[in-house]
């Protein structure tokens, strides 16, 4: 049976206190919505429909970045969850499989939960995902009769007796598309909130003799994000899971709780990650690399056997080949460092390529920006760049070239040539003493006068 996802994401998210639509707030550097889309992707959906209202343009863009086939349905007014699902009707025109409804602010669903819902759908017309709530608070309550789900009662409309029930509604459901829209058509808004409740489809289905059941998952999976505090909790949950996965994959994390990961971080086995390392989006670290303490990586690729840090910053487009070294207080941006090359101390390498086995001395800077445009620096193989060299781009250093310490390189350097561009040294004998004496006398006069 083919499936379609409908992801509800039109809510205002008032409690986020934000100009950004709630579902675009990031967890581990990826919008919440993207986490929900990835969770749903295990069902290989034939169609994905995002129902959006507030900030729909930005939401549509984030959805398209993740899946260009995702469709957008606009809910102009937020009249309730049933009304929201109703907005997906046009996008699902001609689709006759199962619809799975997810929330865009519920990022932690596990693949097997959705698979269990689909499996239960085979024997039921409608399947709801429930969970035992530690604190049922304001969740809708699931009224079970054996295996059959008879009704969902929203907290606002529940009696004290019903509020005592702890089996709660996650909001997710699975149902055949035609059946679902037929049920939604029958939903009214005669309740405490004057909203069209999606939860009402259960009772309507039962009244029509349809089979309805609930599948349970643990509460963590249904964790919804409504506030910044929830967002922080969600991020922490994500981090804990991702660290555990890496440890199981054979990555050493010396102090796991201090390593911050992104949703798309890829790290190969036998890599060692020292404490206090931050991974931004788009990082791949191959097997057997070492990322030393206090390094910050984003949009970069680190190959086998490379050693990065401590205190290194790899920015987007940093491409480190095998057995490279990038040391302390070095920033690399949009630059390829070829096999065995070393940039060990206090350097900025941007918009550049560094050839194999070259050595970049301490304090080297690629002067890539003239205030208007960016320019490239090309460094050949086996080049020795002396400490404190300024490479004024665009510039090329041929294979085997060398620059003298303190050189400002403004012309290309031929292969095997030595570039020296600095003022000649002149040692004035006795001058240091004279200067000291003069300064001390000046200070003494000033102190006396004061
Ligand atoms: C809903 C359920 C409740 C369940 C809870 C789980 C209903 C009536 N109630 O309540 O049983 O326990 O979720 O978290 O469904 N949305 C729209 N358009 C709307 C309204 C909501 O897109 O008009 C979206 C929201 O952005 C959100 C989701 O639907 O992603 C749920 O809406 P929310 O207002 O949070 O519902 P709850 O009151 O929490
Ligand atoms: Mg909610």
Image (spheres, rainbow, N blue to C red):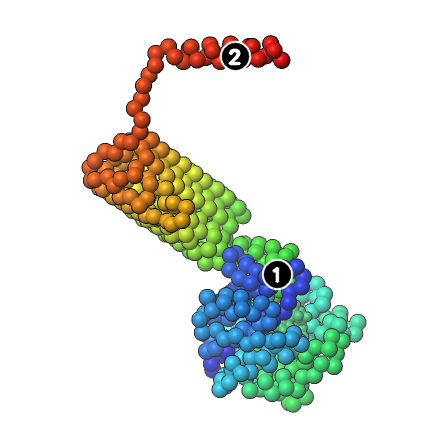
Q: How many numbered marks, from 0 up?
A: 2
Q: Position of residue 172 (x, y in %)?
A: 59, 73
Does the image show residue 5? no
Extreme residue in the right direction = 160
400 to 169, vertically: above or below: above
Image point (51%, 60%), residue name: 30
**Which mark is in front, 1 or 2?**
2
Q: Which mark is residue 442?
A: 2
Element type where label 2 sits in the image: helix
Image quarter in which the C terminus is found: top right
401 to 115, vertically: above or below: above
Q: Which mark is residue 19?
A: 1
How far apart marks 1 and 2 lie (CA) works out to 61 Å
Left or right of 430? Residue 8 is right
Image point (27%, 36%), residue name: 384
Image point (62%, 75%), residue name: 76
Does the image show residue 315? yes
Q: Quadrant of residue 448?
A: top right
Q: Quadrant of residue 347?
A: top left
Image point (49%, 13%), residue name: 439
Give the quarter the ligand 1 occupies.
Answer: bottom right
Element type where label 1 sits in the image: loop
Q: Position of residue 241 (x, y in %)?
A: 52, 57
């Amino acid at each position: 049976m083919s499936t379609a996802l409908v992801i509800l994401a039109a809510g205002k998210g008032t409690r986020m206190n934000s100009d950004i639509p709630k579902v675009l707030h990031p967890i581990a550097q990826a919008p919440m919505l993207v986490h929900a889309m990835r969770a749903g992707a295990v069902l290989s959906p034939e169609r994905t429909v995002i129902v959006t209202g507030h900030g729909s343009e930005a939401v549509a863009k984030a959805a398209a970045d993740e899946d260009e086939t995702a469709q957008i349905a606009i809910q102009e007014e937020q009249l309730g969850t049933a009304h929201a699902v109703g907005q997906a009707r046009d996008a699902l025109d001609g689709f006759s499989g199962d619809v799975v409804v997810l929330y865009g602010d519920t990022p932690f669903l596990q693949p097997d939960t959705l698979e269990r819902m689909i499996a239960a759908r085979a024997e039921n017309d409608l399947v709801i995902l429930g969970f035992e709530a530690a604190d049922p608070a304001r969740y809708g309550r699931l009224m079970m009769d054996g295996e059959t789900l008879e009704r969902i009662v929203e907290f606002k409309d529940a009696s004290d007796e019903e509020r005592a029930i702890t089996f709660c509604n996650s909001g997710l459901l699975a149902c055949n598309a035609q059946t679902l829209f037929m049920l939604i058509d029958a939903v009214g808004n005669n309740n405490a909130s004057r909203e069209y409740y999606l939860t009402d489809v259960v009772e309507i289905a039962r009244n029509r003799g349809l089979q309805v059941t609930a599948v349970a998952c643990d509460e963590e999976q249904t964790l919804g994000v409504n506030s910044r505090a929830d967002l922080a909790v969600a991020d922490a949950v994500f981090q804990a899971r991702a660290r555990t996965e890496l440890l199981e994959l054979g990555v050493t994390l010396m102090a796991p709780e201090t390593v911050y990961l992104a949703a798309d971080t890829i790290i190969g086995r036998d890599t060692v990650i020292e404490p206090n390392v931050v991974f931004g989006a788009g990082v791949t670290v191959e097997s057997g690399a070492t990322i030393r303490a206090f390094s910050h990586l984003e949009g970069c690729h680190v190959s086998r056997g490379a050693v990065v840090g401590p205190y290194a910053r790899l920015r987007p487009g940093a491409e480190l080949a095998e057995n490279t070294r990038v040391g302390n207080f070095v920033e690399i941006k949009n630059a390829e460092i070829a096999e065995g090359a070393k940039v060990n101390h206090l350097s900025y390498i941007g918009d550049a390529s560094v050839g194999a086995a070259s050595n970049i001395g301490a304090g080297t800077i690629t002067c890539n920006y003239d205030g208007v445009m960016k320019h490239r620096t090309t460094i050949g193989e086996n080049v020795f760049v002396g400490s404190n060299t300024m490479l004024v781009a665009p510039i090329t250093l041929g294979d085997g070239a060398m620059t003298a310490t303190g050189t400002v390189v403004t012309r290309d350097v031929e292969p095997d040539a030595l570039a020296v561009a600095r003022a000649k040294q002149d040692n004035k004998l006795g001058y240091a003493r004279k200067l000291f004496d003069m300064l001390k006398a000046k200070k003494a006069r000033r102190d006396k006068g004061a």
